[in-house]
Amino acid sequence: MAAQKGKDLLLKVDTDGLSSFSTVAGLRSRTLSFNAETIDITHQESAGQWRELLDGGGIRSARLSGSGIFKDDASDETVRGLFFNGTVRAWQVVIPDFGTATGLFQVTSLEFAGRHDGELTFDLTLESAGEVLFAPI
C-alpha cells in the first residue's frame, strides 16, 4: 500500500440499526487492529520440539480506537448512547485505497478531556462483537 493521508481513514456507525452508516466524529487519530489467538498443539514428538499451531484454530477479534472531537451534537449523542446502553452496533472502517472493514462492535471505553483554553476531546475503544468482514477495493 502506498502512503496515505491519515485523515482519509473514516470511522462510521450504523446510527439507526438499519444500515444507515454515517461518519461519527472528527477523529484526529485512529487505529484498527486485528488479532488471532493461537491453539498450541505441540507434543512430545513435534519436530525438534518446535511449537505447532492448529491451522485455522483460535479466536479472532478486532479492536478499534480513536481520539478527536465530535463533529456535531448528533454524533456525540449517538456514541454516548451506545456506550451507556452497552449497545452492540454495526460500524465501518474505511481504509482508503485498501478496503472497508464492517462488523458488530461495542463501545468499551469512552473518555473525555479538555484544557481550559482548548476544545473538548474524546478517546474511544470499540471491541468486535461478531464477525468482521473485509471488502477490498
Image (cartoon, helix red, strand yellow):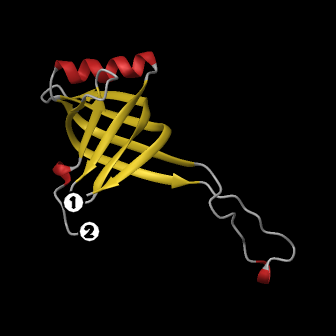
Residue picked out by circle 2: 1
Decide which of 85, 115 is in the foreground and name it: 85
- How would you rate the neighbour count of disc 1 (Cα within 10 Å): few for under 14, some for 14-19, many for 20 or more? some
Q: CA distance from mark 2 to mark 1?
A: 8 Å
Residue at x 12%, y 28% (from the top left corner): 117
- The answer to whether marks 2 and 1 mark residues whose Cβ atoms lie closer than 8 Å is yes
Q: Where residue 94 sits in the image (x, y, percent)? A: 26, 47
Q: Is residue 46 above or below residue 7?
A: below
- Which quarter of the image is occupied by the N terminus? bottom left
Identity, as a three-letter code, of the amino acid under mark 1:
Asp
Eyeballing the image, is 49 above or below 88? below
Residue found 69% across the figure and 66% down from its top: 53
Name the residue at 41% across, 39% down: 103
Q: Residue 100 placed where, x, y %?
A: 30, 49
Q: Residue at x 46, y 53 (%)?
A: 34
Residue located beneath label 1 in the image = 97
Q: Callout 1: helix, strand or loop? A: loop
Q: In what element is the residue under mark 2?
A: loop
Q: Which mark is residue 3?
A: none
Q: Position of residue 12 (x, y in %)?
A: 26, 36
**41 left or right of 32 in image:** right
Left/right of residue 43 with respect to residue 71 in the rendered view = right
Is 73 or 52 nearer to us in this picture?
A: 52
Q: Nearer the viewer, residue 123 or 81?
A: 81
Q: Quadrant of the C terminus?
A: bottom left
Residue type at mark 2 is: Met
Residue found farthest to the bottom: 48
